[in-house]
Amino acid sequence: MPSLKPIETGQIANTDIFTVKNDYTNVYFVKTGVGYILIDAGSNPNKLKTSLDEVKIDINNVNSVFITHSDFDHIAGLTLFSNAEILMSEDELRLKKVLQDLLNEIFLEEEKCLLK
């Protein structure tokens, strides 16, 4: 299996795009006239915050977060962007809700077992 090697944090030359290293992946910030759009939110909020400080991107200037899919390594950093609009496909959102309901049911069943 090939290993993933994220590129280093920084601005991509001759663009308004910043890449931010987050554990074994990268997330991307696109600078707009009114702030930033984030593409995926990474797997490690603490590391993401540190990397953002490195490239001088203020979390409060991130207006939108586009989630390509809801795997953990794409959504864990969402907690940093409470003021941003979160964009994700309806199918992905439905899948996320089904999985969350299933997990809630599993943990509820586990709690019932523990109470016996």
Image (tube, rainbow, N blue to C red):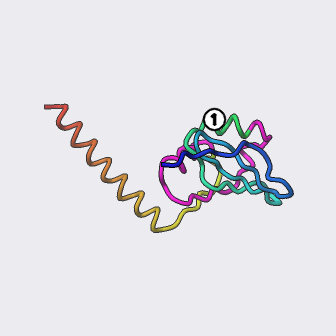
Observer-nearest residue: 18 or 61?
18
Q: Residue at x 54, y 62 (%)?
A: 88
Q: Quadrant of the C terminus?
A: top left
Element at badge 1?
Answer: helix
Q: Does residue 11 appear to the left or right of 106 in the view shown?
A: right
Q: Is residue 109 magenta?
A: no
Q: Which residue is mark 1?
A: 47
* Quarter location, residue 45: top right
* Above or below 66: residue 105: above
Which residues are the magenta region? Answer: 53-80
Residue 115 percent across, percent down from the top left: 18, 31
* Above or below 2: residue 110: above
Residue 80 percent across, percent down from the top left: 62, 42
Observer-nearest residue: 41 or 64?
41
Residue 70 percent across, percent down from the top left: 49, 55
Q: Is residue 75 magenta?
A: yes
Q: Does residue 106 appear to the left or right of 64 in the view shown?
A: left
Q: Residue at x 79, y 59 (%)?
A: 32
Q: Does residue 65 appear to the left or right of 104 in the view shown?
A: right
Q: Residue furthest top?
A: 115
